[in-house]
Amino acid sequence: MAWLNAFLSSTIGQKVVVALTGLFLCTFLVVHMVGNLQLIWGTADKFNLYTYAMTHNKVIKVVSYLTYASIVLHAVMAIWVNRRNAGARPVGYAKKGTNSTWSSRNMVFLGVVILVYIVVHLYNFWFQLKFGEVGTVVIEGKHVKDLYPVVINAFQIPWLVALYVVSMAALSFHLIHGFQSGFQTVGVSHHKYTPFIKQLGIWVFGVLIPLGFAAVPIAVMILKDPIPIP
Amino acid sequence: MDNPYRMKLNLKVWRQHGPQDKGGFQTYALDDVSPDSSFLEMLDLLNEQLVSKREEPVAFDHDCREGICGMCSLYINGHPHGPEQTTTCQLHMRSFSDGETITIEPWRAKAFPIIKDLTVDRSAFERIIQAGGYISVNTGQAVDGNAIPVPKDDAEDAFNAATCIGCGACVAACKNASAMLFVGAKVSHLGLLPQGRPEAAKRAQAMVRQMDAEGFGSCTNTGACSAECPKEIPQSVIGMLNREYLLSTTLSEEG
Ligand code: SF4
Ligand code: FES
């Protein structure tokens, strides 16, 4: 396995790890989006059943562990790469010009914002579901945790909604650069399809998905009334 | 009376006696500069004045002065080779305005240590080339030039990549001081041609290993290098380098 060790300590190999985990997390975002829409268009029961499925289905369980692992690996490796790169220029320039996009130069900063957001987000819902005091309801004969009011009530808090929206803006800029960058790093680049990957990264992953995620807390705050928890 | 065809300039130049010296900026006022002179001729003028004042002239790299050797460098007003996408020797003073303050710094990278003032040691590039930036040929009868067919598109991409002059502006421009554009250019130039294929896997592995050992950073695809490269080497060469490295790691005996 010396070859693997050499690969993972090379500048390219480390970037490939960041790229592959990042692209995997992009697919996770798409799946997550589908669930979110239940909050706007679905019913309380549908949403609770969806949460039940997400926490009980074996396949989903495996995928969720993969997701956690990817987040950790993506963050740790990216910070490692960033430190190594900082060491490649110990003395900086006095007068520095710019000739690249803001996103591309601030990926680590954007990533840290997203990481903080993920921790808050997991505490808000996942932690409450597992360890908090969440009531149960019976839907279709199943005892299901009643997460719906927890979500609706959380999004009545303006600063929390603001945090979600700001984090999604960070996600947007992160993906505008990150999505196409991931493909380039794994060597999937050709003038036949690279322009398409770039557009897909900007419009679907950079605009549509973050907008969709940001829309949920905003819509809940405006449209739904708080639900008293007995 | 001021001559309208002459420029006055303020130069803020990095001066450093040697590799160990801390160094710092020195400002010089220079007038009577022709807008038609090249940037290096302007520096020659400065040095003549310094010498006549019995001061140490500014050390800077140059050789061909016609944009083909890659020896000239300089980080001028925040850009390698200055505001135009060309080499410093092909940059003219008409790209600046009268009375402007011009900041001149050396390339900054751990792998390019400063020798003196604005000159840096770019032999890291030589060592990367020595590691695998070549093709092995047997001597003897010259091979018929047209004996091996080369697809036109490949030949063109290889030629474009081959225009890299090894100046190091890509490293200077990159926020990570990465040499991926340079190495990508070499790997593409040789790897796209049939004569370069047999050693392609070995080359990608060896050149990346040497690049890392020299202390260059990794590529985060900002594109700053291509934006500054005087030979307009495109980002696609980095894509090809990534591909060659990944494939040689997973599918060849190398690595
Ligand atoms: S890729 Fe461009 S900037 Fe880099 S060394 Fe070659 S010619 Fe210079
Ligand atoms: S001196 Fe040769 S390229 Fe500028």
Image: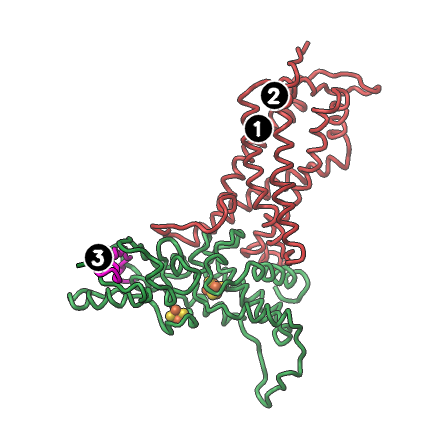
Chain colours: A red, B green
Up/down of A156 relative to B125, above or below:
above
Q: Are marks 3 and 1 on the same chain?
A: no
Residue B71 in view, yes or no? no
CA separation in Å, label 3 and label 2: 62 Å
Looking at the rendered structure, which numbered label has been put on residue A164?
1
Do callouts 3 and 2 mark residues in contact (Cβ within 8 Å)? no
Q: Of B162 and A54, which appears nearest the observer?
A: B162
CA separation in Å, label 1 and label 2: 9 Å
Secondary element type, mark 2: loop
Q: Is residue B31 found inside the magenta-colored segment of the image? A: no
Indicate the amino acid at tag 3: Ala
Q: Residues within 10 Å of mark 3 (few under 14, many from 20)?
A: few
Q: Residue at x 36, y 73 (%)?
A: B63
The answer to which image quadrant residue A52 occupies is: top right
Label 1: chain letter: A
Q: Of B103 and B116, which appears nearest the observer?
A: B103
Which residue carries the number 3 mark?
A: B29
Which residue carries the number 2 mark?
A: A155
Secondary element type, mark 3: strand
Left or right placement of residue A116 versus residue B97 in this view: right
Instruction: Judge depth for marks 3 and 2 and give the one in front.
Output: 3
Q: Earlier in the sequence, mark 1 or mark 2?
A: 2
Q: Residues within 10 Å of mark 2 (few under 14, many from 20)?
A: many
Label 3: chain letter: B
Q: Of A163 and A70, which appears nearest the observer?
A: A163
The magenta stretch spans which residues? B3-18
Q: Position of residue A28 (x, y in %)?
A: 68, 38
Instruction: Judge depth for marks 3 and 1 and give the one in front.
Output: 3
